[in-house]
Amino acid sequence: MTRYVLKRLLLTIPVLLGTIFLVFTIMSLTPGDPGTLILGATAKAEDIAKLNAEFGYDQPFFARFFNYVGDIVLHFDFGESYRTRAPVFDEILARFPNTLRLALLSMVISSAIGTFLGIYSAVKQYSFVDSFMTVMAMVFACMPGFWLGLMLMLLFAVRLQWLPVSGLENWQSYILPVVTSVLSGAAGTLRLTRSTMLETIRQDYIRTARAKGASERTVIWRHAFKNALLPVITSWGMGFGASLGGTIIIETVFAIPGLGTLIVTAIRQKDVPTVLACTLFLSVMFCLIMLVVDILYAFIDPRVKAKMK
Amino acid sequence: MGQETNTREYKKYKKESQVREIWRRFRKSRVAMIGLILLACIILVAIFADVITPYERAIEQHGADRFTPPCGQYLFGTDHLGRDMFARIVHGSRYSLLIGISTSLLSLVIGGLIGAFCGYYGGAFDNLVMRLMDVLMSVPPVLLSLAVVAALGADLKNLLVAMTISCVPGTVRLVRSVVISVADQDYIEAAHSYGGGDWRIILKYVLPNAMGPIIVSTTMNISAMILSAAGLSFIGMGVQPPAPEWGSLLNESRAHMFEAPYLLYVPGICILLTALGFNLVGDGLRDALDPKLKD
Amino acid sequence: MEKEKFLEVRNLKVVYQTDAATVHAVNHISFSLARGETLGLVGETGAGKTTTALSILRLLPERTARIQEGEILFEGNSLLPLSEAEMRKIRGEKISMIFQDPMTALNPVIPVGRQIAESLILHNEQGLSRDAIEELVEKSLEMVGIPASRKGEYPHQFSGGMKQRVVIAIALACNPDLLIADEPTTALDVTIQAQVLRMMKDLRERLGTAMIMITHDLGIVAQICDYVGVMYAGEIVEYGRMEDIFDAPRHHPYTLGLFGSIPDLESDARRLTPIEGLTPDPSNLPSGCKFSPRCPQCRDVCRQKAPDIWQNGQHRIACHLYSGKEAQT
């Protein structure tokens, strides 16, 4: 198992490098150079050139890329912001915990709720509860998260005044953003869990278990659950990706000082280093979660474990 | 000669009866039919938007009628500039459908070709492409779109490009895996032994037989694309005002949510219903195409 | 002399109700079995053999299948009125089943040893200790010819024949009184088929288990069965001792057809005569004798009236050819 984890970790490195390269390339498509962006088009040409040299912008693309990666690996330096001229990393570090907390909380709660309700729904197939949950899941999965956030805000913060409208001052202010993203996330997980569970229940080995005289509960939890869990685990990881994406938008709704709001502001201000670094941070987080998910997967599925040895 | 016409007739007949059978099964699901009717309504509204109300009404500003709550004259009220929300909503449907459908189809064509190629040939090219897709997929889709929009600038065209890019990796993977499973079947082997060319085999035998899951996932993609487009427009990174895209309507109205909350209700419900329509139809199609899944 | 009826199926009728149609899977079949005997149920795919087996274990799909008529008596007690909990005590312990496809019958994420142990733990009335159960697991693996050291391995690490052995070990773990084997060798290579069959025969002799062997292979029947029921369209069209089926002069035309479709090494292989036509659609069965549309000896009466049963000792044939005729002695 340790070998598998190590191997999987090593495999993550090229993907991360690839991700950096991808995002770096996309961002380098931004028209204009830092000098002009910061000083404005009316500034003197030599000042602009000087500033560009300071940002390393006078060098060819690949040199810039390798410098960028080198700075990250060696000094944990993600460059400096065009706007504040301060290291981007400081700003990110101040906001990162908020985003991480929101995304992780949403992922954990929505995975747990979604998986449990999905199994319940599948076991009670054709019942009223099942139909009800299927419909609700469908509706919440199709509901734009930011709109749901706005509606919840209107109801609980504006009308009823139970919860704070925005910001992230105390634990109450986490409730609305987390609930918003949990409702969408759990809906997706529920639908997937339900359908994989239904498929699993039809498998021959479930009938074998019944023929042994196993009770319905044993059949569901011991035999079906573990098998149905495999695709569901992957969906937890993907759900985390979705909730990261969702968080960016939900942060805007609730004016939460996280990476999402930072990236949106940075895009408006054409602050390329900040956008680049935020994107990288979020992607790396996603990669790491997928890594954990993969390892979890191997723990459960002996076939994968055997293949990876 | 006569034999060949016969075979062709038979094939046509078979295809027709297959479609009819799928339709029969689809029709039986009440939920899927609700989705279909929903979609039909929305598509009709989008097509006949100019007949329902001229585009000018969607951008005309009536300073005197700012923040009029819903009434006879303004069915959904007016916004902070006195624009008719009803007209804006009606014309906004075009954006959502255009974005959702075009990005999904575009990514289907691009991803489909790449995926079919990879799945059919395998080898080094497949390996390279799949690693590239791994990288693309390691960036959450919304973030990837956002990065592209950030670099290229926020407008409709760039939004389409950005969202297509974020949608392609999933399609490549799906088509690849479906093609691999189909290409393993005996009838493909048989087609080879008749000496069919590779592309001919892919287009004539592999893709048609792999169509089911691909159609379903494209339908589902449209729904997802509509949602993310609305999200991006909402944070100002998609369709730009004054274009009445539903997400950007919400973005504009958000600042006035306290005095005019009614401005928020309708666009959200419209996005929800459109996404729901595609999703329900996709679900129905999946059940209709693969009857095993339903008892 | 009336034999001791250990399992008795009386007038069983099972239908599957789907939105589109009512499928008549099993139509009024009756048979009985004594302790230690083996009954072969033969017939084409869709003849209702598996449905019959699942009815005995009451494992038919809940929503669609219904036992409409009939009775199933096991050791003199009716199984149909039993509650789920009472039924669970019988499944695996008294009656167990070997399923058709060994590739899918085992849970892929549980080691095979644990899957065998599960039956033992579920039916652990004597209160065996964990070690004792482990010992039994090892013993049953060895009994089916798998080294006990492999008990911690997962199904994907075994070949098809080995998996079938594991499936058999699971079914036999609690020394059941009745074993239902649903085409236990169909998915296997011919050489492995022979091995598995020999093993099952051995086990039956050693443990004295009664068996219902479901198959479409008359060769297997000849090797292992005491009694044979030939099923067609949910009915038993011919029933008798093995000798009756293989040697007696009178047969149901369908049975003859079945024999005709076996390649025989001794006779000329070119004379292979498959039965014309297809098995009838069980949601739309023909009237009269259900075999009439395919029967080479079909007469008018066959299309109108269901045949009576001709009986000679334990040999029964449901066919108009013999109705009213005296049993030959």
Image: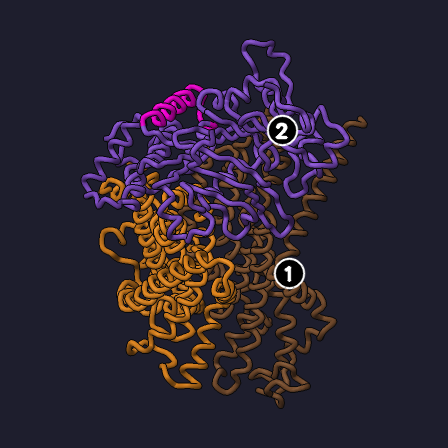
Query: Is A168 above or below relative to B16?
Result: below
C193 magenta-colored: yes
Q: What numbered label is drawn on residue C222? A: none
| Residue, disc 1 | B33
Instruction: Give the magenta part as a residue range.
Output: C186-206
Is residue B124 visible from the viewing direction of this image?
A: no
Give the percent coordinates (x, y) of residue C159.
Answer: 37, 28
Q: Secondary structure at mark 2?
A: strand
B46 magenta-colored: no
What secondary structure is the magenta-colored segment mainly?
helix
At label 2, the amino acid type is: Trp
At label 1, the amino acid type is: Met
B93 on left or right of B136: right
Nearer to us: label 1 or label 2? 2
| Residue, disc 2 | C310
- In this view, the residue farthest toward the bottom is B64
Categorize mark 1 by other alpha carbons within 10 Å: few (<14), some (14-19), many (20+). Answer: some
Q: Colour of chain A?
A: orange
Give the percent coordinates (x, y) of residue B192.
Answer: 59, 26
Q: Chain of mark 1?
A: B
